[in-house]
Every structure is written in structure tokens, then in C-alpha cells.
Image (cartoon, grey):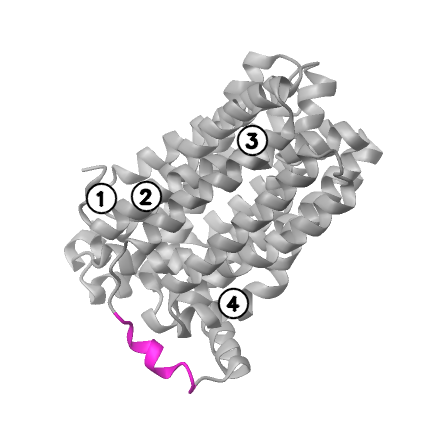
Amino acid sequence: MVFRALKYRNFRLFFSGQGISLTGTWMQSIAMSWLVYRMTNSAFMLGVVGFSSQIPTFILAPFTGVLADRHNRHKMLVVTQTLAMLQAFILAFLTLTGHIAVWHIIVLGVFLGCISSLDIPARHSFILEMVEEKENLGNAIALNSMMFNMARLIGPSIAGILIAVAGEGVCFLINAVSYFAVIASLLAMKIPRRYNEKKEADYNMLKDLREGFNYAFGFVPIKAILFLLGIISLMGMSYAVLMPVFAKDILHGGPHTLGFLMGAVGIGSLAGTIYLASKKNIITLGRMLPIAAGIFGLSVMIFSFSHNLVFSLVLLFFSGFGIMVQMAASNTILQTIVDDDKRGRIMSFYTMAFMGMAPFGSLFSGMLASKIGVSNTLIISGLCCILAAVIFAFNLPSLRKTVRPIYVKMGIVSEIEMKG
């Protein structure tokens, strides 16, 4: 059953509230990138803005992961969502009053990045507290990704129209208002007290950080998954930062074209999450990782040659499918094999790999695109993703042997199923 995790009340609340809020978030993301490119006409500045909004995640995520393991994740999410709402209101006010400048966008991006560094590991590790049973964890993660991509499909399309009709500031204002939905859903939840809240005064930040690092990088399957995810994020995800250049200069379109392009990525990602949600077990997720990464890298490479809108939309569909399957499958495997008391820290390393490496990729791609062009930049990005997928696939048999006993011990699958 595709929607089986929705039987849990808390997860239903989260699913609905977060879905509304994320639609606004995607509207803001598209409007911000278009505003920056309209103001500067610079691919490099798109990279700078992307870097500034994501670099705090790379720096702070290991520390916020410790906080997510030791404090009330539910309360954390209420605070982070409230602060994100404040950021959106400030951005909307500056834009609607005509006082917005690029440095405002950079500063507010850093502020939102600091918020996200705590929000993301807390949110990912909070999923198990909402679904309660590990056998439904994979479905909940897939549905969470589905909700994310439904928002990515709807948000950019609405933003493209609103930017053309009313300007970027309206998108920022709608995003700010949308946060009320997720905050209300969080406040309506009933969450039992977690065991490690009783130990809030007993932990040592550096000791717990070192313990989490040794655990993550001392266990080969976790290390390999994080490595693949980090390469994909560093070299591949920058294609989204350069999308305004493709929309305006290569496809000769406007903000509605940008909305269509990002919407195609959203449709592909949505298809990927539906595919994952329909799977009854997690045995085959490991082999999906290199396949999905290869599909993503190949799609990005071919997209770099496209000058036709329809063909570009098809390719972006496959890139969205590939990256979402790779990301969500990695999340599911990591959350399944990790010890409960280290979940927040492992999710913080997951955040570093997927979100934290992106700012370096954004900055590098912006600089490279200004020198060799956006098309050549994406060719290099796609090749790196394919190479990382091949390396992971080569090591997959030994990784599966290491993970197999964990699945059997946890009762997720039987010994007979694993041998099959």
C-alpha cells in the first residue's frame, strides 16, 4: 500500500502541514534565483547566493546532529519553522518596498542556512517518532519525499506565473504565510517523551560529535553511501543553480520557462518517490543507488546539449527521478541500519553530504560556467556523477554482505529472503 504510513496521526498532520509550507518554500527558491539573475545578469552571483545559503549547513550540521540526538526534536522543529517564517517575511518586506539588494539576499540566505542546519537532521530523525514502527519507515520517508516533490511541482509553476504578473516579492510573502500551516500541524501533535531527553544535562558536545563521526566513518556501508551522496551533491546538484541561465539565455524564455524546467524535475522526483513508496521491502534499495545516480548523471550530461524546451523537460524528468531515488533510498538505508541513539548525528552527516556539499558545488559551477559556459560545466558534472556511481557499484557486493546480518537481526527481513 503506497500510503500506509498515513495511518499514523502525527505523520498525517506533518504530511499536510509540511506540504503546504514546502510549496511556499519552492516558490521562494525560484523567485530568489530569478531575482538575483535579473538584478545581476551573472551566473557567478547565482553561485555565490547558492553558496551563502547552504554553507552554514556544512559547517554546523555535525553539531546540530548532536543536539537532535539529545533534545526534543518536536520542539526544535517548532522553533526552526518559526525562524524560517521570520526570514521569509523580512525578504518579502524588502522586496515589496523596493529596498532589496543582493547583499540582503546573501545575509538572509546565511540566516536561513543556519536554521536549516538544525531543522534538516531534526526533521529526518523525527520521522521514526511519528511512524513508530520501523517496517513502515521506508514508506514514510518515500511519502515525505513525495510531499516534497509535489511541492516542487506546484511551487515553481505558481511562482513562474506570479513573478511575471506581480513580481518576486509576492512569492516571498506567500511563503512566509505558508509556514503557519506546518507550525499549526506540529503544535497539534502528541509526542511521547524520548529517553534521551532525560540525559540533556549529561552529554558532552565534542565527545558525542567524535562518537558519531567514528561510528559513521568506521562502518563501511554508511561511509560508502555518504561518499556517493556527497559526490552527487558536489558535482551534480549545481545544475539547479544554473537553471535561470538555461531558461533565459539558451532556451530564450522567461520566468515561466524556469518554472516549467523546475516543474519537470519535480514530476520526475515525484515519480521516483511513488516508485519507492510502492516497494514492500528494502532489500533491493542498495542496488538502486548506483543505478539512480547513473541515470541522474547521464540525464544532466545530455541536458547540457539541449536547445529544445520539450526535450529539456524530458531529460529533467529523468534527472529528477534519478536524484530522488538515490537520495530517498540512501536516507532509508541509513535510518534503518543506524543505532537509535545516533540517528540525529547520522542524519546530520547525511545533511552534510547532500546539502552541505551543494554550496561548494554551486560556487564552483558558477565560477566554471563563467569561464567555459554552462553547457560544458554540466558535461563535467554529469561525468563525475557517473564515475562515482560506477565506483559504488563495484563495491556493492561487499557492502551488501556487511548490511545483510543487520537486516536479519532487526527482523526486517528473514534469512531466507536475504539469500533469495
Horizontally, is 98 left or right of 57 in the view? right
Quarter of the rendering containing residue 381: top right
- Cα distance in 3D space between marks 3 and 4: 34 Å
In the displayed structure image, the side of residue 246 where residue 18 appears, left or right: left
Asked where in the image residue 123 lies, by quadrant, the reply is bottom left
To which residue does mark 3 refer? 298
**Are the residues flagged by discs 2 and 1 in contact, CB closer than 8 Å?**
yes
- Looking at the rendered image, the disc whose residue lies closer to the viewer, 3 or 1, is 1
**What residue do we see at 23% from left, 37% from top?**
2
Residue designated by label 1: 6
Determine contact: label 3, label 1, CB under 8 Å.
no
Q: Amino acid at mark 2?
A: Phe
Q: Which residue is mark 4?
A: 64
Residue sitting at 82 percent across and 34 percent down? 370
Magenta region: which residues? Answer: 193-202
Secondary structure beneath label 2: helix
Q: Position of residue 349 (x, y in %)?
A: 51, 62
Question: Element at badge 1?
Answer: helix
Looking at numbered disc 1 in the image, what kind of residue is underneath it? Leu
**Dot 4 or dot 1, earlier in sequence:** 1
Say whether disc 3 or disc 4 marks the residue closer to the N-terminus: 4
